[in-house]
Amino acid sequence: MKFQVITFYEFRALSNLESIKSSLKNTMLENSVYGTVIIAEEGFNSTVCGTRDDIELFLAKVENIFNTRIRGKSSFHEEMAFKRQKVKIKEEIVTLRKKVDIKVGIGTHVDSAKWNELLQDPEMMVLDVRNDYEHRVGTFKRAVNPQTGSFNELPEFVEQNLDPKKHKKVAIFCTGGIRCEKFAPYLKEQGFADVYQLDGGILRYLAETSGKDSLWEGECFVFDERVSVDKRLKKGIAKDFSSEKNNA
């Protein structure tokens, strides 16, 4: 495979966003890396694509900009997965429009093996925190589809359909983990007793789990030119339902 696609994020306090934006954009240009980096006062979120060598150089510079270690999820593709080089400053790196203390989610992460165990528990509410058009491409067995068109609609779904007194165990998952990082503490703050989030999301699960051990069904929607990846993290064949999201 010629091009590496890597997604990464981190919740951490940031300031001087305009300066960071300039440094990141220059780094993308200098290393021929395409995709999007979102920054906010709460952290950063990115999916980018380039050759292996360009991605390696890019990540080293990004780690220096943020003074951190990047913990990303990678897949590969024969072609460039993005057409543009974008750095955006936003209010949130993933938009929930609810104040959440990320630290409340500490201790809710589970690895792929533990996740499989949780899905066997008949008392477990398994909630797909992605949007309807993503769920339709593929999901885990038993997962509930909230039929949302955007992430910020999910709190309303929970308010109307879930009860902390009834749903004492809730397991949530998303593509790369970032939405769960916000929604796990949100659920805890709403009074749900036992909340679990799939660490690294579907992408890490597919990288770590194969064959008969995999409880994933279908393909995984991704936000780039590939549309979806299969269980081997190679370009899938799924239809892009995202254009229908407003009608979902």
Image: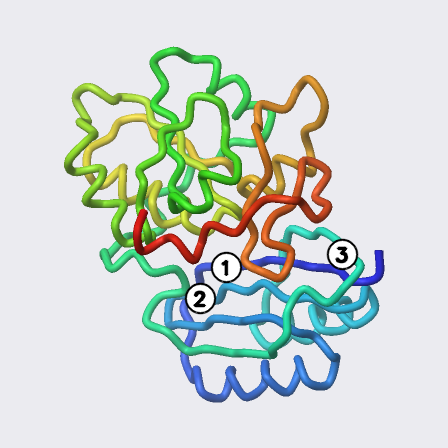
Element marked by disc 1: strand
* Whole-number angstrom distance, CA of label 2 to CA of label 3: 28 Å
| Picture coordinates of residue 60, whole percent (x, y) | 72, 70
For marks 2 and 3 on the same chain, the one whose residue lies earlier in the sequence: 2
Residue 156 falls left or right of residue 141: left
- Marks 1 and 3: which is nearer the front? 3
Instruction: State if disc 2 and disc 1 touch (CB < 8 Å).
Output: yes
Looking at the rendered structure, the kind of residue marked 2 is Gly
Residue 231 falls left or right of residue 123: right
Few, some or many C-alpha atoms within 10 Å of disc 3 (few <14, some 14-19, many ≥20)? some
Few, some or many C-alpha atoms within 10 Å of disc 1 (few <14, some 14-19, many ≥20)? many
The residue that disc 1 covers is: 10
| Picture coordinates of residue 55, whole percent (x, y) | 74, 68
Q: Which residue occupies the foreground of this view, 108 or 169?
A: 169
Residue at 27% in and 45% down: 154
Q: How many marks?
A: 3
| Picture coordinates of residue 111, whole percent (x, y) | 57, 31
Looking at the rendered structure, the kind of residue marked 3 is His
Residue at 40% in and 36% down: 128
Q: Which residue occupies the foreground of this view, 88 or 244?
A: 244
| Picture coordinates of residue 11, whole percent (x, y) | 44, 59
Element marked by disc 3: strand
The residue that disc 2 covers is: 43
The residue that disc 3 covers is: 77
For marks 1 and 2 on the same chain, the one whose residue lies earlier in the sequence: 1
Q: Would you place residue 19 above or below residue 114 in this image? A: below
Q: What numbered label is drawn on residue 157?
A: none
Residue 183 falls left or right of residue 18: left
* Whole-number angstrom distance, CA of label 1 to CA of label 3: 25 Å
